[in-house]
Amino acid sequence: MIIVISSTGDSKYSVLDSRFGRCSNFAVYNSKTDTYEFVENSAAASGHGAGISAAQKVTDLKANVVLTGNLGPKAKQVLDASGIKGYQVHDMKIEDAVHAYQNGEAREIASAGPSHQG
Amino acid sequence: MKIAILSGKGGTGKTTVSTNLAQIMRLNYVDCDVEEPNGYIFLKPVIQKTEEVFIPVPLIDSDVCTLCGKCADSCQFNALARTMSNVLFFEELCHGCGACTIVCPALAIEEVNRPIGNISTGEYESLNFMDGKLNIKEPMAGPIISKLKKSIPEGIDTIIDCAPGTSCNVVKALEDTDYAILVTEPTKFGLHDLKLAVKLVRNMQIPFGIIINRSDETVNMIKVYCETETIDLIGEIPFSRRVAEMYSNGLLLTKDLEFGKIFHEIASNLRNLIDSEVEQAGDACK
């Protein structure tokens, strides 16, 4: 399983970024190998449509699940169409966020938050 | 010749200056503040023609689409996203550039017209009047401004009333103009945004001067700024309740004796400044 987490930095000790579209990095956790990879979020600098572009990136990373603070309506629409579920996690280290999700402590993001919050 | 009126800060009197100068100098008037055009309130034109403005947007045939994602990669505005099941299109982000259609290897994209606003053409006092209007909830005014400017008749001088700020919309309206008038007010906000507007017109190498609206002191921060920066002061409109009353009733200030005189003065200063600019440009050519 591939879990993508919106991150403020590029290590598993970095803090999760509650903004999805404009986070600086994506942490890509592969549960099969128990390894992390980090990719820059090029969407962060977009004038408009950062959430759409970020969701496209997450789709390209072949994610099964996204851990983040909130998802805007457009990002949610893209993730939904790719069958990727979002889960809400707050201010914690990337590694801890993955554990929280695996322990069933993360809540599924069923509906999108307001737009332009990131 | 095209004269653009801009301000930096909103609500400093762009339309007041534009409409009154247009009327007193017998110039065509084009309202490029397409998010909120209001020049018509004062010039009261008879509108002869209104035409819709469209941008081309992609229509994707999902039966032909191979989900290769090239369209989404090519989109500079994040208007397209390739998901695992389809290509999603977010129309309000699309600039109508057509890149997606060009790159689609499956030829699955057809361009269709989407209306974003309209352009009205008419007459006031036997002069040409035009304005553009962006539809509600549309974010992109550029195509309407470009179309407006393409429709400006040659031969007669034209006043171009710009949007506030220094955004793309103002840049579009300013392009190919011969002179710019920066309208400001003697407040910190007025000065702050004026400086941004000055930077913009200098960057675009458009000769310009300043008009101070709501001017109530013999020495104020705008005049000091003009002096230190050696910027031409075209004129001042005094701070007056009468101006606010006439404006609120949709009346041109040129209809008033006192303010008519002020605008005559501004118009004659403006002509002199523009003439000397033309002369300088001529000398530079030699």
Image (spheres, coloured by chain):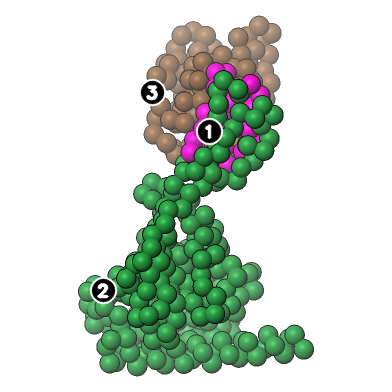
Chain colours: A brown, B green
> How many numbered markers are drawn?
3
Quadrant showing the C terminus of chain B: bottom right
Q: What's the residue type where badge 2 is placed?
A: Gly
**Is residue B126 visible from the viewing direction of this image?**
yes
Q: Which of B226 and B152 is in front in this view?
A: B152
Mark 3: which secondary structure?
loop
Q: Residues within 10 Å of mark 2 (few under 14, many from 20)?
A: some
Magenta residues (range): B66-91
Question: Which is more toward the observer, B222 or B149?
Answer: B149
Crowding at mark 1 (Cα within 10 Å: few <14, some 14-19, many 20+): some
For mark 1, give the secondary structure: strand
Residue hosting label 2: B250
Of mark 2 and mark 1, the one earlier in the sequence is: 1
Q: Which mark is residue B59?
A: 1
**Mark 3 belongs to which subunit?**
A
Q: Relative to A10, is B131 on the left or the right? A: left
* Chain for disc number 1: B
Residue at (68% x, 21% y) in the render? A37
